Amino acid sequence: MSGAATTPALAIADAVRRRERRAVEVVEEHLAAIAEVDGGLGCFLEVTADQARRRAAEVDAAVDAGRDPGPLAGVPVAVKDNLCTQGVPTTCASRILQGWHPPYDATVVTRLAGAGAVVVGKTNLDEFAMGSSTESSAFGPTRNPHDPERVPGGSSGGSAAAVAAGLAPLALGSDTGGSIRQPAALCGVVGMKPTYGTVSRYGLVAFASSLDQVGPFARSVADAAALYDAIAGHDPCDSTSLHQVPPACGPAVGSGVGGLRVGLVTELTEAEGVQADVRRRVAEAAEALASAGATVDPVSIPELRVALPAYYLLAPAEASSNLARYDGVRYGLRVDGDDVADMNARTREAGFGAEVKRRILLGTYALSAGYYDAYYGQAQRVRTLIIQAFRRAYEDFDVLLSATTPSTAFRLGEKVDDPLAMYLSDVCTIPTNLAGHPAMSVPFGTDGAGLPVGVQVLAPALGEAVMVAAAAVLEQAAPPTSLPTVAAPTLTGAGTGRGAATGGAR
Amino acid sequence: MARLARIALTEDELDRYAPQLASVLEHAAQVAALDTAGAAPTAHPFPLRNVLRPDEPRPSLDPQVVLAEAPAAEEGRFRVPRILGEAP
Amino acid sequence: MSAPDGWEAVIGLEVHCELRTRTKLFCGCRNAFGSEPNTNVCPVCLGLPGSLPVLNEAAVELAMRIGAALHCEIRPSVFHRKNYFYPDMPKDYQVSQYDEPINVDGYLDLPDGSRVGIVRAHIEEDTGKTSHVGETGRIHGAGHALVDYNRAGVPLVEIVSAPDITTAAQARLYAAELRAILVASGASDGRMEEGSMRVDANVSVRRVGDVRLGTRCEVKNLNSLRSLARAVDHEIERQVGVIESGGVVEQQTRHWDEDQGCTVALRSKEEAFDYRYFPEPDLVPLDPDAAWIERVRASLGPMPADRRAAVTALLGGGEPSDARSDQVATVVELGLDHLVTAAASAGVDPALALARTANEAAAAAEAARSVDPAAYAALLQMEQRQELSATQAKAVLAELMAGGGDPAQIAGRMGFEALAADSLAEVVAAVVAEHPDEWERFCGGEAKLAGFFTGHVMRRTQGKANGKAVAAELARLRG
Ligand SMILES: [Mg+2]
Ligand SMILES: [Zn+2]
């Protein structure tokens, strides 16, 4: 008998809605797995056990009363700790917000509840989502379940690792420059960054407002699609929320890629620094799509080469303004001072970590008088060039294919003191954020060391359905991979369905 | 920059961050050097316009809940150290 | 007072005006003055992490009304963030319009015939309120400060004039006229004492004939029209003094000290802030279509200048006296001129209608604005027909403003039965008989004794007698 920690989210919801399983049991199993495993992984900053139990009981009561709790009935979900949860600490993995209890829920958290899901806890991240390894968390790093000496990627490392380790079948993350897709790739799970504006940002603590987007993690494309469908949709509380009905992704799973035109992006795959193993996997993925009926051709989009430097002007600039409010006046940390300005400065010195300070300084510089035109203004124009370049590419292709990250999971500490090297791990993911387009990472085999490799499917704005269809084909065709070495007991050694059957320990 | 960003950096931090920022800015110089003539700046990926809400009151927060989060409060208000200088 | 001989001043005013919306600019909290501290706050206006702004349609519409009233071009606009740290600002940036404001390039005609250009009138959010607590209660030496965010996020329009103003008197006239326009357009209540209209003055001086502009100083904290005029005068004098004694005017922000009657330096240009403006990524551009702009322009009623002309025309004949002009300006500024018009067209003497409105009604302008014009006209008719004395009419008006109703019924309820003409004659005759000496002197030409007799008649009739009727009876008896 396989435990809930190995069961797909949709299977859990199906069983709970049919009254074949109880949401309270599902939650207990996951809480037990968290208790057993998470001490060594550090996925969670807060486990909301009591709330989860109460919520699960409500879901069961609804089923008993003949009501449908929703498409994610009883499914445990881990929520990145930069999403506001009413009365539950929300820290952004920063000392400056330690102990803050938001008086409101993020819209996506409300939508999760509306879909019958059960939040089991808040997951670790790079401080204020700034990073690619989850090492900049003020509360310690998260470790990769495939190799605890390696990073899970970031910034949504806690969510990615929790799903990989079977501590939750679903998780929410946020993606500003790759913060969902990069950790998904490094942890061997599915991660999706939706079209900007399809998922509400209300209650997502801002890093770079014009780039941030909330999205799902799951162990399968179908589960990720189901979570996306549950959280997407117009929100009047977010002025940048699109008014269009977002494309339903669930039905796209299994619709295949027959006749689909796929472009293999040279700049995001052949670029220097992309590991040979990763390139090989992307080539195999392209072949898999071709043999499933797609036509695959290489495409060069030279403009993407300047996406990374443009991003490292735009995102820090917005961040420097978004993070000004952490001043010790209204909430969070305060370090006293002689006068209010002194108090502000001391509080921010003590409350922010090195990476956050670096980016605030960088962003302050990019916006300052005399530099705005050369840096921020120019980066915005580059953004236009990238959007135009993608538009041209999508005249010839329905979706694009690339590596998700240049390398597989690197060692803890390897890049912490070299910001530029760290920034380069987002080189393949950043362009879609600048364009506002959707993209997702699907596990596709391993490197020579047995570490997961992710391939990225990119689509034009609101192209989620076709993106999911292609991702589902890749999932089916993916080479066998090993199970995480650190994982929920029910996950370790148990069959976990597709793509995880063989390989054994590395 | 540190003063503008209102962070009381230590000497040690200044020594450490300066070369790191320089290397990032050097990388960013690629952007500054690019010919972007004819490209309008993009502030938003999608050209939304006129997103408005009706002028209808909605419940405010309970002041007790609000002030419970304050590092210091007094007489229903947020307490801060003395303020030198007026707002710009 | 104008600039000293040989000197001229160049003055531009920046006026911040709070818009009369029900809710704040970006959230559903109430836009209300005088609530308990921190009761009109929510995640958005407190700048809590994760919160996002959504623009209030009514605020945009009122801003467009201001633009239309000031003959501005109403344009597509973009919100920017103005970044600086201050504890009354929840996000440590102010959302404001920067290089693409909604209204540009208008003008305002002053009653003295001059025209002042309007550079821009843009939308922005207000800050919270800080109170300094400590030994002196003032900024310097204060022990600590307390912050209330009820006002944070209240919608403002900042109106920037061209530097077309040359004297303190003209500055005052501009501010008064602008206030009248803001009230008339329905955009603001224009209450300077409550801070819903705040004025900053940019002042520089130069020698007459010099085309170059002098170095300007910005004077803040002008809480009344009187302070504005005094501060501008003082600042002109100060700057001329500095230059004439061989000094150089430094570009500064200065604070008007009402008690000391002088401006004091707050900071100089070297300490000027780098606001790091950039487009607010949480909001999208505003681009009102032609139909909306047209609707706003069409819905705008007559502006104060036209309305003053209309009331003046009622008075008939030539230039009105200064006192009359002041009364006209008052009723228009307070939005009470429709009461004068209603009464006049019901046959009431326009001078009486103007006087009652500019004095008694204006004293409770808020209440007076909701009075039924027909009832108001009926009341003044009763007074004119001498069915009510002036004192009685004022008492009835107070009731009418407090709770509405029919003036005749109110008068009845208050016991103001009109004194029949024959009984008034009896009372007057009795009073005259009781004071033969005074009567003789009155008949001998001591006109001021009319007051003496009227007082006695009033006392005997418990104030029911009509003053004019008493005077008429006295005149008749004297023959
Ligand atoms: Mg302003
Ligand atoms: Zn509010």
Image: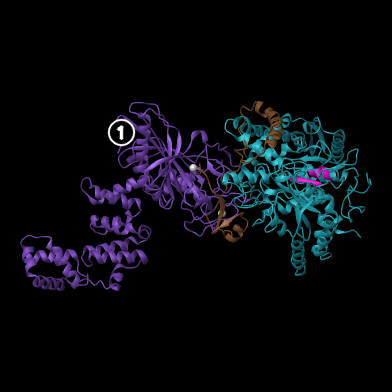
Chain colours: A cyan, B brown, C purple
Q: Residue at x 26, y 65 (%)?
A: C393
The picture quadrant where one finds residue A260 is top right
Where residue A53 appears, x then y in whole percent? 77, 64
Where residue A146 appears, x then y in whole percent? 87, 46
> In the image, A95: left or right of C366?
right
The picture quadrant where one finds residue C164 is top left
Quarter of the figure with the N terminus of chain C: top left
Residue C456 seen in render: yes
> In the image, A177: left or right of C218?
right
How many numbered dots are placed on residues in this image? 1
> Disc 1 marks which amino acid?
Pro
Which residues are the magenta region?
Answer: A183-193
Where residue A134 appears, x then y in whole percent? 77, 44
Element type at marker 1? loop
Whether A463 is drawn above or below A112: the answer is above
How many other residues sit within 10 Å of disc 1, few (<14), some (14-19) or many (≥20)?
Answer: few
Quarter of the figure with the C terminus of chain C: bottom left
Specify the subunit that label 1 lies on: C
Q: Please name the residue that numbered disc 1 is placed on.
A: C4
Q: Residue at x 61, y 60 (%)?
A: B65
Residue C164 seen in render: no
Whether A309 is drawn above or below C382: the answer is above
Query: In terms of depth relative to the viewer, which is nearer, C476 or A489?
Result: A489
Q: Is mark 1 within 8 Å of ligand 1?
A: no
Q: Is residue C188 magenta?
A: no
Where residue C73 appears, x then y in whole percent? 45, 39
Query: In terms of depth relative to the viewer, which is nearer, A243 or C65?
Result: C65
Whether B48 is drawn above or below A490: the answer is above
Q: Is residue A188 magenta?
A: yes
> In the image, A340: left or right of C220?
right
